[in-house]
Amino acid sequence: MGGCPTGKVPGSHRGRRKRGLPTDLQNEIVQEIETLLGHQAIADLDLEAVEMAARRQALRLAARALEQRLNTDLGDHVGPELPCACGGSAKYHGRHGKTFESVLGPLHLQRAYYHCEQCESGFCPRDRALGLESFSLTPGVLRMTASTAALVSFEESSGLLHELAGVEVSAKQVERAAEALGAEIAVDERQHVEKMGEVAPPRAPTLYLGMDGTGVPMRAQEVKGRAGKQADGSAKTREAKLVTVWTAESRDKEGQPVRDPGSVTYSAAIESAATLDTSPDLSDFAARVQREANRRGFTEAQRQAVLGDGSAWIWNTASELFPQATQILDRFHAKEHLSQVGKVLYGDSPEGKPWIQARYDELDQGRLQSLVAALHGHAGQYQEARECIHYIWKNRRRMRYPKFHQQGLCTSTGVVEAGCKVVIGTRLKRAGMHWSVKGANAIIALRCSKLSGRFEDFWERRSDHNKAAA
Ligand SMILES: [Zn+2]
């Protein structure tokens, strides 16, 4: 049989006084595993069952050890009274127990509790010191929760946390924790605009900045009385606006610039891009664009290009903030527009495809006059054709693609379009999802932070801040 390395009978040292914690813990874990394995031949093991059980046991032992260590330390009792945030004085009310969900499983902690009669609320100094003030979740679980909730729905997050980490966090807890953390990130994003030096590749000669908008499905009360695109003039969505910055120094097989992997950062929110003409302040969205541009050193690049579709707010923001930047109508968007017009003009008939392709070619070759002439033939009959002519005329200087290509600029990346899908669509526009502005903005902030590689920095600042405040 497999020998027992500690030479003890399983369970014999329960209740014994703890000496060196690590050795004891290690011995106990070895013991537990021996118990799990029993006498069966290794070849007959259900390894999955054993490994899962072993992890559960090991974590449970670790949780007991940690609990004991924390609960025997009474250092958080710092006298009969403590000043309360309300200005009053909070009195010591003994030690209060509470169960927290930790990465080791449930932790039952006894903490010194102070109660203030003036504002009728209480607090535990230790919870503040250890960062335990978030929905009965320890910092480790809170961080895991943020990671899953940034990527998948609250329900799925709860399921993943259970399956992968053996941690129990209900969908409602995930929602509350993720939205609270997202709101913190949104505040943090406004305050921290220092340059991200590490985004690859360093000192790229050309930086690209894209803007786009996409509708987020809203709860009915959030869009009450707002004008929208529904048949009755009401709205079901609010527009989230996104800014994304990237570099494109890599080249594809044809030598065309392509987006550098890992160079993309995002910032987005449901907010206004408009201000009164008389206001000296930037709109909320323009201020966001400015912050992202600062973080990426956009205006310090030798060359700056702004990409977007035809929306007026994009070009107003670009002209206001970066008058020196080259404005490019994202070719991806322009083609999408032409293909929509082609579908209206020809429906499913076989002439449709070659017509659309011919317009694509004119667009790529910069033959805008010929493109407009082709649309003119349909302008009498179709409003879509008239609108498209207007769109091309308005954006003609942003559609000088041959010139842009000569300069080695990237004109059709789909990055901006993809940005909206990646940041907003895949997480916030799934079947059955309806958001409040507050909730959507929190999750968008969390997601942008994760996808832009800024979550680690945020988390570090948060831990430092919590320690300093305790
Ligand atoms: Zn108080």
Image (cartoon, rainbow, N blue to C red):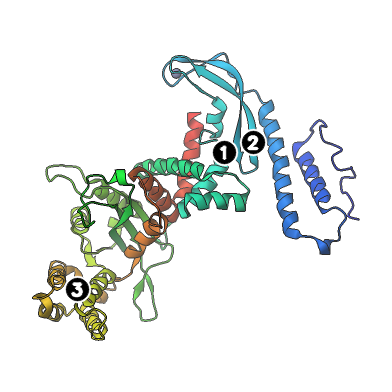
Instruction: Choose top left, top right, bottom left or bottom right for residue 100.
Output: top right
CA gap between label 2 and label 1 equals 9 Å
362 in relation to 99, above or below: below
Closer-to-camera residue (90/343) = 343
Question: Which of the two labelled residues, at mark 1 and mark 3, occupies the earlier sequence position?
Answer: 1
Task: Say whether marks 2 and 3 touch (CB < 8 Å).
Answer: no
Give the amino acid type for the residue marked by disc 3 in the picture: Arg
Answer with the quadrant where ligand 1 appears in the image: top left
Q: Residue 244: image x %, image y %?
A: 33, 58
Task: Say whether marks 2 and 1 touch (CB < 8 Å).
Answer: yes
The residue lying at 51 percent from left, 33 percent from top is 133
CA gap between label 1 and label 3 equals 55 Å
Identify residue for label 2.
107
The residue lying at 46 percent from left, 41 percent from top is 176
Give the amino acid type for the residue marked by disc 1 in the picture: Thr
Q: Residue 125: image x %, image y %?
A: 54, 25
162 in relation to 461, above or below: below
Say which of marks 1 and 3 sits in front.
1
Using residue 222 as the reference point, say whether residue 120 is left or right of it.
Answer: right
Q: Check disc 2 and report its element: helix, strand or loop.
A: strand
Identify residue for label 3.
400
Question: Which of the two labelled residues, at mark 2 and mark 1, occupies the earlier sequence position?
Answer: 2
In the rendering, which numbered label is found on residue 138? 1
Crowd rating for badge 3 (residues with CA inside 10 Å; few <14, some 14–19, many 20+): many
